[in-house]
Image (cartoon, grey):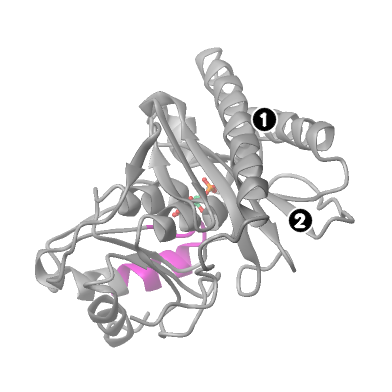
Amino acid sequence: MNEPADRTPATDTEDGPRIKELRELAIHIATGAAEMAARMRHEGVAVAATKSSSTDVVTEADRATEQHIRELISRARPDDAILGEEGDSVSGTTGLTWVVDPIDGTVNYLYGIGSWAVSVAVVEGEPEPTSWRTLAGSVVAPRLSEVYSAGAGEGATLNGRPLRLEPHSGLSDSLVATGFGYESARRTAQGRVVAQLLGSVRDIRRMGSAALDLCAVAAGRVDAYYELGTKPWDHAAGALVAREAGAWVGGLKDDERESERMLVAANPGISKQLRAALRDAGA
Ligand code: LIP
């Protein structure tokens, strides 16, 4: 099974403590931010603006929660860089970048659907998914009472319980999650791909948050997830959780890293079959 390059070898002695510390900080920050976003949802949700299309909304809570996350990061690690969905990038001097999505699944948040999460990851190198090394990450879904986390070479957990994928090999009995973009032309194209794929899998799930879809792969709740058009902050933490649970994570080709072009996370037993089916479907 050939993995794209990010699958870091087991942590060597001096990397381990650093990764553990960063993982604990990611969990702490994501948990605090999730409580804040849940409280704000309870008090009522307000759309602040729209972004790439009229359906791509940002709420007051997205902005306030990201501001809170940035303050926590700057206090704990003032020299690190920050890449967040809702604010300007902050440069740093340590070579580490925190990649932040304050509310992944904003439309679910808006509609009062519980599948939304705060996603916080820290990466090393260029803050670009096709070249960065993800060191640690956490995805916290307060309405689901779920705290996912992972450290490079340290494994993945859900509420402290280790996650490890069971073997699975048949695409035809695989449950596959996917997502659709905010632009109608893109959704139409994604609709054609999923229509063709449907006959080759058990069923499709559209849960509305890339971060939680990736964690669902890690937890074995779906056998795979794929999506075209996800942003770095949508998948930074969830991809590490899936990878550390034993999933294959990357693009459509064997040696391709996950990117906006395509993100695939799958049980290793079906990753080749799924990517071939996606290519046949014109993905
Ligand atoms: C969402 C992603 C989801 C995708 C949505 C949206 P957001 O991110 O998590 O996978 O299908 O279109 O991009 O906008 O809620 O942070």
Residue 259, image quadrant: bottom right
Q: Looking at mark 1, is its residue's CB closer than 8 Å to ligand 1?
A: no
Question: Which residue position holds label 1?
Answer: 65
Q: Quadrant of the C terminus?
A: bottom left
Assign the magenta stretch its main secondary structure: helix
Q: Residue furthest toward the front? A: 13
**Residue 95 percent location from the top left of the image:** 81, 60
- In the image, 177 versus 159, the foreground residue is 159
Picture layout, residue 157 above or below residue 83:
above
Label 1 secondary element:
helix
Q: Are marks 2 and 1 in contact (CB under 8 Å)?
A: no
Residue type marked 2: Leu
Query: Pointer 2: residues within 10 angstroms few (<14), some, or many (20+)?
Result: many
Residue at screen point 62% across, 39% down? 26
* Residue 274 counted in the magenta span: no
* Segment colored magenta: 179-192
- Circle nearer the N terminus (2, 1): 1
> x and y percent of residue 132 in the render?
65, 68
Q: CA distance from mark 2 to mark 1?
A: 21 Å
Residue type of the residue flagged with mark 1: Thr
On the image, the x and y values in percent for residue 137 come to 56, 47
- Towards the viewer: 10 or 45: 10
Judge depth for marks 2 and 1 and give the one in front: 2
Whether residue 47 is visible, yes or no, is: no
Tag 2, which secondary structure?
strand
The residue carrying mark 2 is 96
Q: Residue at x 30, y 52 (%)?
A: 164
